[in-house]
Amino acid sequence: MTVRDKRLYLEDLTVSFDGFKALNKLSLYVDPGELLCIIGPNGAGKTTMMDVITGKTRPDSGTAWFGRGIDLLTLTEPEIVSAGIGRKFQKPSVFEQLTVLENLELALSGPRSFPKMLRARITPAQQERIDQVLEIIGLSPLRASLGSILAHGQKQWLEIGMLLMLNPELLLVDEPVAGMTPHEIERTAELLRSLAGTHSVVVVEHDMSFVRSIARRVIVLHEGQVIAEGDMDKVQKDARVIEVYLGV
């Protein structure tokens, strides 16, 4: 597989804030359909990396390519979403005054007002997609429930579902299991594994047992650079990873 066949290709990205290098010539790639986990201590550059991918932050130097020939550094944030990249932040941001179904309907065409959504007519194809996503995220029985009554894990799954409504090629997921119960963590692992293959999924997470349960490849960041890469056994035995992150 050549570089041009990668779903995401980052090379020599550098981002500085007041002299501090949040990213320092960062290079990494994501394969089509891959489920990749990125770990590292606080301040390692994980969030800044996702900010660059989604257009929130512009790097001082480097390149960021998506698919075949899409230069992410030339696009706005909405254009990057339209190109096929979805991002889920750590804190769920579902519309609690709307039902699960209405949240998914609202996600169909991006940001728009609720009154406009009520007047819009859902096509049969769109309804089929909504039903598919409800099954994927496991919330079909709760389709008529308000977002406000959902458990924490269910809100996380709903937000992933809202991203899936736009059928992104790449999903960026930030600390999806923070604050979850063991059962919710297990269900989230199943959900993310089910998305891989159809989508490329990049997960930033601190829960090492969760990372081990979902990732074939793990990348460790420190001071804005990749310091280790491989399966979980390999990176956990890496001397530098132990020193700067695992602390064992």
Image (tube, rainbow, N blue to C red):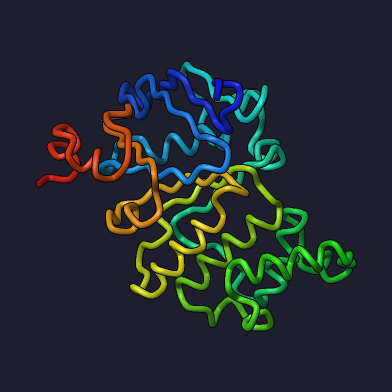
Between 191 and 62, the one nearer to me in the picture: 191
Q: Quadrant of the N terminus?
A: top right
Total marks in image: 0
Name the residue nearer the viewer: 130 or 2: 2
Horizontal side of 227 relative to 45 (left or right) equals left
Q: Is residue 49 left or right of residue 116?
A: left
Residue 220 occupies quadrant: top left
In front of the other: 219 or 230: 230
- How far across and down, in percent of the image, does residue 48 sit? 42, 36
The x, y position of residue 139, in whole percent, is: 60, 76
Residue name at image x 47 percent, y 78 percent: 151
Q: Is residue 150 left or right of residue 95?
A: left
Q: Position of residue 224 (x, y in %)?
A: 33, 29
Looking at this view, name the residue that lies furthest to the front: 1
Query: For the point 48% across and 29% down, which residue is it?
Result: 29
**Residue 124 is at least partly visible in this image:** yes
Q: Is residue 43 above or below residue 13?
A: below
Residue at 67%, 65% (x, y): give it: 133
**Vertical placement of 238 versus 200: above or below?**
above
Give the x, y percent position of residue 208.
27, 54
Is residue 120 at all visible to an observer of this figure? no
- Examine the image and state in which quarter residue 160 appears: bottom right
Residue at x-position 58% and y-position 48%: 197
